[in-house]
Image: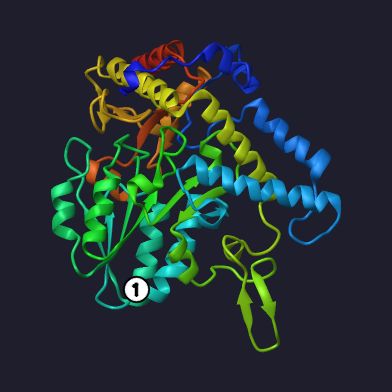
Amino acid sequence: MSTQDVEPLNVEQIREDFPILQREFDGNQVVYLDNAATTQTPEPVVDTICNYYRQTNANVHRGIHHLSQEASIAYEEAHDRLAEFVGASGEREEMVFTKGTTEALNLVAYAWGLNELSEGDEVVLTEMEHHSSLVTWQQIARKVGAEVRYVRVDDDGTLDVDHARELISEDTEMVSAVHVSNTLGAVNPVGELADLAHDHDALIFVDGAQAVPTRPVDVEDIDADFYAFSGHKMLGPTGVGGLYGKKHLLEEMEPFNYGGEMILRVTKEDATWNDLPWKFEAGTPLIAQGVALSAAADYLEDLGMDRVQAHEEEMAEYAYDRLTEFEDVTVYGPPGDDRSGLVSFTIDGVHAHDLASILNDHAVAIRAGHHCTQPLHEKLGVAATARASFYVYNTREEVDALIHAIDDARQIFA
């Protein structure tokens, strides 16, 4: 079913769950368009965090008292919930809680990469990778003598899949690709990349930081070997995220961190590891954050992920159309009807940081900079872009406020 055919979100009702959107600065109500960096947190998720600390707070898996048992059950069920949310039938054994996408990438790069990669092997990335992927694999490859290669981005901001077919070879051991670009708004064919990787006996890691919050994701349909996401980009708290991994791969990997919780038995000479996923969650884990992340998944599922996707794409297309009305504005990435919910752009003669400052005077919050994609910006020929990103609580009126503030900036620098 096309996203154009789904029932629209009741944005006015949704906004009631986000009191922060009613804040004002110098008489202007805030227009929050920095959702690709961090989304706001709805009242039901905030209530979940508060209720956990007020009613259930205890360490997990270590006590026989009631509170510990309640906390353990809630934490375990949160793993099951997030596994279900991304389509992992293996449930909690295939869902490791991390601090976010960055830690998930490092976990796989160190726990798998250091043991499996060697001189002569290749890791294939895309030119639109976030630094959390690019830098991590770059440094691991340097340690083991492997080579990092990059799939080109075409002039229209989409991935050159033909080039991917050329690059992925018998020497490729890992393909690591972003599902949705945080700069271009491009949605990559990660299922096709997974097929290419598996055809050459390689694995694929998918960075889903911008995808899991914004569209239905099924890791098994994609056939991802690893898939990561961050809670704070999907209405959840900061400091928590998820790593999906195929069970047999997680079982074969060595732990990334050592300490309490992740062990089964310890002697003076050796140690054995706990069952999945606790093997990768050393120390006191992210209990309250994980429980709250489960509540965020519930909130999004109640809205309907197809409706979430349709709404953010509608906002991005409208913003794209309004921005391209200006002759001195350049928008990067695919056309407005073929992108995710963000637009990155530049204005002739106006630095992105200056633009963001002027927009802030209007209480319009955007992001300016290289968005942790410096090599991509170098390819685009710009040092920085301005980025407006949209979510379930944004409206066309807020896009209009963005355009009005941009026009003000254009007049100032004219």
Residue 344, horizontal then vertical, whole percent: 33, 31
Q: Residue at x 38, y 48 (%)?
A: 220
Can you tell which quarter of the image residue 285 is in? bottom right
Residue 362 vertical position relative to residue 111 in the rendered view, above or below: above
Q: Residue at x 40, y 49 (%)?
A: 207
**Residue furthest out toward the front:** 89
As helix, strand or loop, the secondary structure at mark 1 comes to loop
Q: Residue at x 58, y 13 (%)?
A: 13
Q: Quadrant of the C terminus?
A: top left
Is residue 64 visible in the rendered image? The answer is yes
Residue 118 vertical position relative to residue 1 in the rendered view, above or below: below
Front one among 3 and 41: 3
Residue 83, horizontal then vertical, whole percent: 52, 46
Label 1 is placed on what type of residue? Leu
Residue ID for mark 1: 117
Front one among 83 and 14: 83
Front one among 51 and 383: 51
Label 1 neighbour load within 10 Å: few <14, some 14-19, many 20+: many
